[in-house]
Amino acid sequence: MTAQQTAATWRDFEPMQLGPILGNALDAFHENGFHGTTVRDLARRVGVTVPALYYHHENKEAMLVALLESAVRNLIDRCRAAVTEGGDDPVLRFSYFYEAVVLNMTHRARPSALDSEVRHLSPENRRGYAAVRKELELMLLDLIRDGADRGVFDVDDIPETVRALLGMGQSIARWYQIDGPLTPDEVADRYTAIALRVVGHPTTS
Amino acid sequence: MTAQQTAATWRDFEPMQLGPILGNALDAFHENGFHGTTVRDLARRVGVTVPALYYHHENKEAMLVALLESAVRNLIDRCRAAVTEGGDDPVLRFSYFYEAVVLNMTHRARPSALDSEVRHLSPENRRGYAAVRKELELMLLDLIRDGADRGVFDVDDIPETVRALLGMGQSIARWYQIDGPLTPDEVADRYTAIALRVVGHPTTS
């Protein structure tokens, strides 16, 4: 999951390779929330003893941090590959970036939805996660600024637009279901068109 | 909190009148999550016995439902008053609606953020909450359709635009802090401008 994404693969989502402990932690946090999951529950799910669990992860919060950070690092890798594929075209770079975000929120809805548990992290871990995620925000900030500088985007408040676009993307993970009526590609198409409107570059309808 | 909002008051946010049980439940769910809160914790916070708590609310989930529904009903009342104040102007009606949403997500960030606990409800309660919230979606759908019919908005996919706009608004409750750098009015101004772009009616910058 942490392997670098190449331009050819940022649209592909293989099954995640989380391993038994983090895989079960993801299931448990999804079903019962972070605070509703005990280390004992986790050990039972994994089929190991509690001490064996602590051998691999310092505590339950460390597992949540590992899941959150691996999810956001994977997303950042995809976004970087997407931007690279966009070459020197600011509209394409932005569109591919946002497509990568939306594909991630649909194909990886469960780990992405863990973002709502961030507020339960300790201040230190919250800062650490925010620092990793900051890279995603800065990438989008640069893409919008570049498009504005080159006259293809028209944006009033770039930092707030970044936050709004990432919030809009993040919200998809809350409702998306892979067996629902929309494929990830369909959601990505629609949301990318909306994102282009937000940056003042509407596609022709 | 469930009183009808008049056109004069939809921008005003008085302290919520939740009562001791739901007020403490909101604090506890916010701090520890729904699954991380026990009825025993709640009784201790309120200063009553567990049976006394059950006298008022069937169970812990019923308290979450009451909080969620009162929050969304209050939001719907505000939005209705906002739309009324917009009179017959489709742009104003839409702008006031979205302003009401954003003001709610900032002034009432904590109850609004409870929305992320909806997935822990039973299917029946989830359907019930979705039915209440549906009214908000339908209001926004009508506003956008009306603006499109009257030629002031230009939208490709109205239902998806509704979902994206509400998701963008909902995401504010996740990061907004009342003692932070932005006032609710500032956030509302910026997000309403972004929302107008999304429906193809950008304000002049």
Image (cartoon, coloured by chain):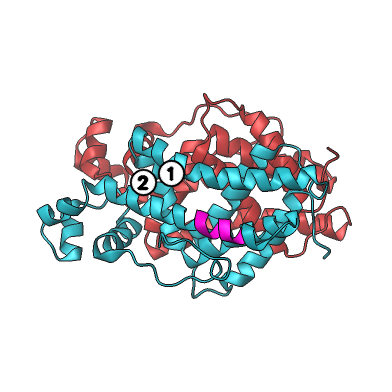
Chain colours: A red, B cyan
Mark 1 = which residue? A67
Is residue A197 placed above or below B14 in the rendered structure?
A: above
Instruction: Determine if marks 2 and 1 fall on one subunit.
Output: yes
Where residue B93 appears, x then y in whole percent?
Answer: 68, 57
Q: Quadrant of residue A163?
A: bottom right
Are discs 2 and 1 less than 8 Å apart at CB?
yes
Where residue A40 appears, x then y in whole percent?
Answer: 20, 41
- Residue closer to the observer: B141 or A170: B141
Is residue A160 placed above or below A85 in the rendered structure?
A: below
**In the image, what residue occupies the spot 47% across and 61% down?**
B4
State the SS at label 2: helix
Tell me which chain the residue with mark 2 is part of. A
Where residue B55 appears, x then y in whole percent?
Answer: 15, 52
Q: Which residues are magenta?
A: B76-82
Tell me which chain the residue with mark 1 is part of. A
Q: Is residue B176 left or right of residue B19?
A: right
- Residue closer to the observer: B132 or A205: B132
- Mark sitting on residue A114: none
Query: Which amino acid, by three-letter code, is at mark 1?
Result: Leu
- Residue closer to the observer: A109 or A18: A109
Mark 2 = which residue? A63
State the SS at label 1: helix
Q: Is residue A65 left or right of residue B24?
A: right
Q: Is residue B83 visible?
A: yes
